[in-house]
Amino acid sequence: MSDSSLVIRDLPAGERPRERMRQYGPEALSNAELLAIVVRVGSKGESAVRLGERLLREFGGLAGIARARIPQLSALPGLGLAKAAQLRAAFELGKRLAAAAEGERPLITSAATAAALVMEDLRHREQECMVALLLDIRNQLIRQQLITLGTLAGSPAHPREIFREAIVHNAAALILVHNHPSGDPSPSEGDLVLTARLVKAGELMGIPLHDHIIIGGGRYVSLKDAGRM
């Protein structure tokens, strides 16, 4: 073969994922075969299916691949930026479909229900991320908005960035959630200072901050419930 990359059509007919999907449906395909259809092209001496198998091993299954960012994916030999972007797009579409299938917008009745919305997304992140849960007048979720994506040391945010999204989406209130990559959800002095500023800003703008929740590992701390707001 003149091309150094193996594509799906180079496989024997009975091993081609697209052909198997056409004949038997997507349910009959393995995770590696479905990933092969997404990335389309393998690497030197390695088919797309083998690349899919290696992806699953390297990231510990589909959940690990779904959590991985583009730089992490593209660093895997044989993957590259284009294939990493294709994977991220596929998982994001699945995430959006799952959210759309839930039907009625979630009702946020407590810190527990708010934390549950973002726990799986934030608990394993290696960078500190800040998310705003934008609520309507009935405390139903309008939108879950990523505000900042920081470094290992933190995720600086300014009230104007947070309330800009609330204004754009006509939110009546909001809940702020961020993670501590260390796994300890205890609030820092910076967390408390930021929360106090946001409470004051919310009062001035008529968009109250209902809570500030910190996630660490599989735990969370609600500053409201802890009497720290």
Image: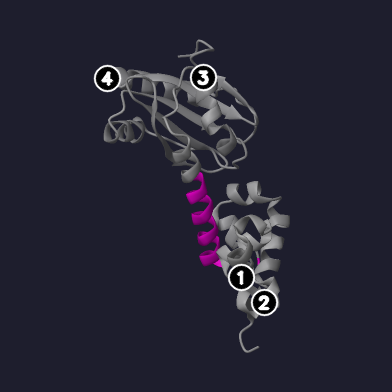
Question: Are the two marked residues, 1 and 2, in contact with CB atoms closer than 8 angstroms?
Answer: yes
Q: Which mark is residue 13?
A: 2
From mark 4 to mark 1, how far is it between C-alphas?
A: 57 Å
Q: Along the polypeptide, which appears first: circle 3 or circle 1?
A: 1
In the image, what residue occupies the spot 61% across and 78% down? Answer: 9
* Disc 1 residue crowd, few under 14, some 14–19, many 20+, Cα 10 Å: some
Relative vertical location of residue 58 with respect to residue 102 in this rendering, above or below: below
Q: Along the polypeptide, which appears first: circle 3 or circle 4?
A: 3
Task: Residue type at mark 3: give it.
Answer: Ala
Task: Residue type at mark 4: give it.
Answer: Gly
* Disc 3 residue crowd, few under 14, some 14–19, many 20+, Cα 10 Å: some
Relative vertical location of residue 110 with respect to residue 148 in this rendering, above or below: above
Q: Is residue 53 left or right of residue 72?
A: right
Q: Residue furthest bottom?
A: 2
3 or 4: mark nearer the eye: 3
- Badge 1 element: helix
Residue 17 horizontal/vertical position (percent): 63, 67
Residue marked by disc 4: 206
Q: Is residue 171 left or right of residue 78?
A: left
Highlighted range, magenta: 77-95
Residue 95 horizontal/vertical position (percent): 51, 45
Q: Is residue 163 left or right of residue 24?
A: left
- Badge 2 element: helix
In the image, what residue occupies the spot 65% across and 88% down? Answer: 1
Figure label count: 4
Residue marked by disc 3: 111
Q: Which mark is residue 19?
A: 1
Q: Along the polypeptide, which appears first: circle 2 or circle 3?
A: 2
Task: Residue type at mark 1: give it.
Answer: Glu
